[in-house]
Amino acid sequence: MTNPSFRRTAPIVLRSIRIWSGLFLLAFVTSHLINLSLGLITIETMDRARPYLSGFWSGPITGFLLSASLISHFVLGLWALYVRPTLRTNTQDIVQMLTGMIVVPLLATHAIGISMLADAGVDFGYADTIRLFWLQAPALGLMQVVMLSVVWVHGSAGLFTWLRSKENAGRLLNWLYLLAVIVPVFALLGYAEAGREMLIAGQAGANLASNPAIPEDVVVPFAQIKQVTRAIIYGSIILVVFTLVARFIRLILQKTQEVILVRNGGQEMISTSALSMLSGFQHNDQLHANLCAGRGRCGTCAVRVIRSEFPLPLASELEQRTLYKVGAPEGARLACQLTPAGGKVEVQAIYPADYTFEDARPTETATPSEVPA
């Protein structure tokens, strides 16, 4: 197809912000998990590595970028939830969506706590942290473990979905699947071993358990941290509920028309003008290629429109970019981005339903030149 203008439209910019803010947050969590895994050696080793792993994020520049990433990723995630035509999708997408509602508020409490302690001039090392979480406030320690687990699941799901839309990411994904298991497991083992070391030290007469739950120089900033994080959690819950209610109201007020989809000359499928063509296929339990889970990144859901009773909306800049990237033929559209206004629409799928970027075969409805290598 012809080369599109490649303008930086708002949807494209917002999509880029959401992707890169998510990657930045995943890097934040990964460095903390690696630091925790060093507990398999000693707590002292954890503290020695802290300036280069966990402590790195408390700097003024990284702290600002972290806060900006937290806010932008959460807000854009809520917007994506609001405009989403249907919540029916694959299991990985559901997990990512559910964890996304709580991951940023949980992560914000941790990130803000680190930042506020640094601003107060308090050096709260891993020895103090392990003592607090294992001896004085185990419930708080459990919450941190849950937080890291939820964040890791959400970030890994998002990373895999993003990389699946890349043509040359197949081999990389195999290694990342392995790391997705190894990194959190070693972090939990390191956390447990550090806790065991602290308990043994206490039982050996270090009298750690009799120490105050929070060191004296941390009492004031810690109290402030509790107030701020509580406000963040409650505020985030309110925003999520508001988004879900607003979405429900939008769907009730939305006027729709019946759409009849016919793919590859098969049976008719009933859909509505509120759903994209891809969602229409999925609602009729028809498999259709979509490696990026309908985000308009991979182009594998592309179809060639044969005829439509109603005029079809023009392709957005985002859709044109993706079609050009995968070398789709003239007249092709992305099923995940095309929302018919009504009537009967007949299309031919360009890729088979089980297509992956490792495949190089054409479908029965397209010539070899129409399927990008």
Image (cartoon, grey):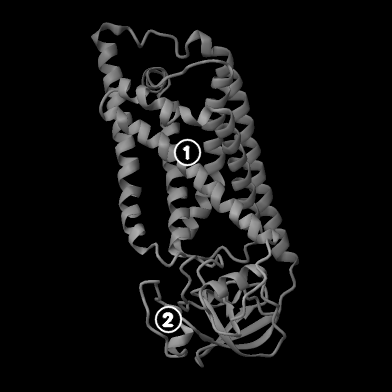
Near-viewer residue (10 or 335): 10
Relative image position of residue 147 (x, y in whole percent) = 46, 37
Relative image position of residue 349 (x, y in whole percent) = 50, 84
- Mark 1: few, some, or many residues within 10 Å (few <14, many ≥20)? some
Q: Is residue 49 above or below residue 204?
A: below
* Image quarter of the N terminus: bottom right
Q: Is residue 80 above or below residue 59?
A: below
Relative image position of residue 77 (x, y in whole percent) = 60, 52
The residue beneath circle 1 is 28
Q: Amino acid at mark 2?
A: Pro
The residue beneath circle 2 is 352
Relative image position of residue 155 (x, y in whole percent) = 46, 48
Element at label 2: loop
Residue at coordinates 24% horizontally, 9% vertically from top-left?
204
State which quadrant residue 277 falls in: bottom right
State which quadrant residue 232 falls in: top right
- Mark 2: few, some, or many residues within 10 Å (few <14, many ≥20)? some
